[in-house]
Image: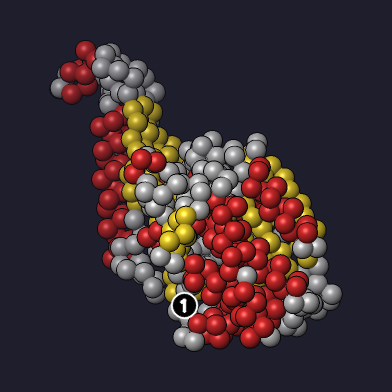
Amino acid sequence: MENRISNLVDERLEELVQLLADLVRFPTVSPPARNTTGVQRYIQDFLEQEKFETVSWDVFPSDPNVVGIKKGTDGNLYNSLIINGHIDVAEVGYETEWTVPVFELTTKDGNAYGRGTSDMKGAVAATLLAVKLLNELGVELKGDLQIQTVIGEEAGEAGTLSCMEKGYTADFALVVDGSDRQIHGQGGVITGWITIKSKEVFHDAMRMSMLHAGGSVNGASAIEKMMKVIAGLQDLERHWAVTKKYPGFAPGTTTINPAVIEGGRHAAFVADECRLWITVHFYPNETYQSVTKEIEEHLNHVAKADTWLRENPIHFRWGGKSMIEERGEIFPALEMNADHAAVQLLAHCHEQTEKSPAIIGMSRSVTDAGWLGAAGIPTVIYGPGKLEEAHSVDEKINIEELVVFTKTLMIFINEWCNTTSVN
């Protein structure tokens, strides 16, 4: 079967490239988002032609998820599989910096160029061709195969979370986001807003009465008080760098980035409010709930040492389902079990195709994989495309890499969905 798969994929190279061209032609940039209806209808029609039962729903207006399920012949006894990929692409920036058309596929020197080729429409095109060719080969799957194409990954809009909330599940999930065909888990990311707000508002001329003995005005600038919060976050960040570690990550990966600060009304007022937007990275063996609890406890101790902050407590707002709508996002961590039967099988399929051992490690980035893991589904990231190509000008993917990935994916689907489930 491996030889038949390999030969057939080689024969259908032009079709693979055309599929990718079709997907790239849809300008699904996020933000601004709300622009994926066309590409999702294309994918839904494709899956239905391949005998998948499909469902589509709007996560946000004009941004639908698509789920296609091909029922196995004996789904209760054999392994089921989710293949998940996002269909939105990163912002383009200045098109004048590109030397190729942004949304028209260009092939040269063995590469395919265009926004989303590497992140991650190449992987979606490979997935679509894989299921089509398995059908043509007459492969009968005993376990269920589920394809999820989701929206919003680029802007933290949790399209995959929406799938989990609707109860979609499987014995194993493969997120085919770019990993250079390495098998990855990941750390996590959460953003948060820290707000300091005065109970009183003062004119700028009152500042001297807040600063000097005898002034008798118990007030403060929220901006200046936020400086204490930032110093406290830096202390906690350094503490984490010394005390926390996880295999596959460099020391100090657990960062707390003060990314955006907003505050004050205008120059005639003492700033009565200040808001700090932070981005927090954490290890695979941590949850965003535990990490945010650590930060809150630490900053509340900082506040106890300040008489004004004791009376004007710090407020926290964590995460969100959209960087666009809510200015907040969550990417849960994914602690991968390298000894899981599906991970070992995937590594074996990779080695069959590539004639070299699979690399099992940790991603330097974050993907939607954490939402699948948080739902209790054993999950890994494994897809074509290099991290340095994601979001880049003249984004590209190596065509041979797509071909090889398609072969590995087909072999894995066939073997996993035809293996008896242990659940």
145 lies left or right of 192: right
Q: Amino acid at mark 1?
A: Ile
Q: Nearer the viewer, residue 251 or 372?
A: 372
Q: Which residue is mark 1?
A: 360
Query: In this orientation, which residue lies closer to the viewer: 306 or 328?
Result: 328
Left or right placement of residue 135 versus residue 90 in this view = right
Residue 327 in the image: state x and y as whole percent. Answer: 48, 38
Task: Indicate whether 21 appears above or below 249.
Answer: above
Badge 1 density bin: few <14, some 14–19, many ≥20, Cα 10 Å:
some
Quadrant location of the C terminus?
Answer: bottom right
The vertical placement of 414 against 125, above or below, is below
Q: Residue at x 58, y 69 (%)?
A: 13
Residue 170: give x, y in percent of width and height: 70, 68
Query: In terms of secondary structure, where does tag 1 sit?
Result: strand
Looking at the picture, how far across and down is residue 182, in whole percent?
Answer: 47, 73
User: Percent position (x, y) of residue 35?
Assistant: 59, 39
Residue 14 visible, this angle: yes
Q: Is residue 275 left or right of residue 293?
A: left
Image height of 194 relative to 222, above or below: below
Residue placed at 30% from the left, 36% from the top?
Answer: 226
Q: Residue placed at 78% from the left, 59% from the top? A: 49
